[in-house]
Amino acid sequence: MGFESEDHAKAYWKENLALMLKLLSVWFIVSFGFGIILADWLNQIQFFGFKLGFWFAQQGAIYTFIVLIFIYIRQMNKLDKKYQVEEE
């Protein structure tokens, strides 16, 4: 197990960092944007009997973070296969 060349290693880490940046951006938007900045505006909308801004601040950000973890795992497995560095 290892990279074929240093170029493959650099490309792997570049794609890994791009993926993390995208997922962390989503997490930031949901937790900070929806839960704090846009909370008052979102509270005008009801979601299962709760104000949507309150729901994002209390539960939505957590659910989103858990989903992002599974997306990261799936995408990293694909990336490992692409660069042939998956675990046996």
Image (tube, rainbow, N blue to C red):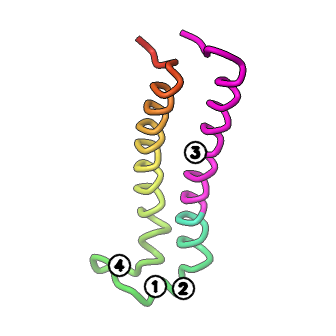
- Seen at 59% across and 73% down, the residue is 36
SS state under label 3? helix
- Asked if residue 87 is positioned above or below residue 37 in the image, the reply reads above
Query: Can you tell which mark lies on residue 43?
Result: 1
Whole-number angstrom distance, CA of label 2 to CA of label 4: 13 Å
Q: Which residue is mark 2?
A: 40
Whole-number angstrom distance, CA of label 3 to CA of label 1: 31 Å
In the image, residue 29 lies at what x, y percent? 58, 66
- Asked if residue 55 is positioned above or below residue 70 in the image, the reply reads below
- Seen at 47% across and 77% down, the residue is 53
- Seen at 44% across and 30% down, the residue is 77
| N-term mark: 2 or 4 | 2
Q: Which one is closest to the eye, mark 3 or mark 1? A: 3
Extent of the magenta region: 1-28
SS state under label 2? helix
Type of amino acid at the residue the image marks with label 4: Phe
Q: Nearer the viewer, residue 83 or 72?
A: 83
Q: Which residue is mark 4?
A: 50
The secondary structure that most of the magenta stretch takes on is helix
Count the labels in the image.
4
| N-term mark: 3 or 4 | 3
> Mark 1–mark 2 contact, CB under 8 Å?
yes
Whole-number angstrom distance, CA of label 1 to CA of label 2: 5 Å
In the image, residue 38 lies at what x, y percent? 57, 80
Residue 71 image-quadrant placement? top left
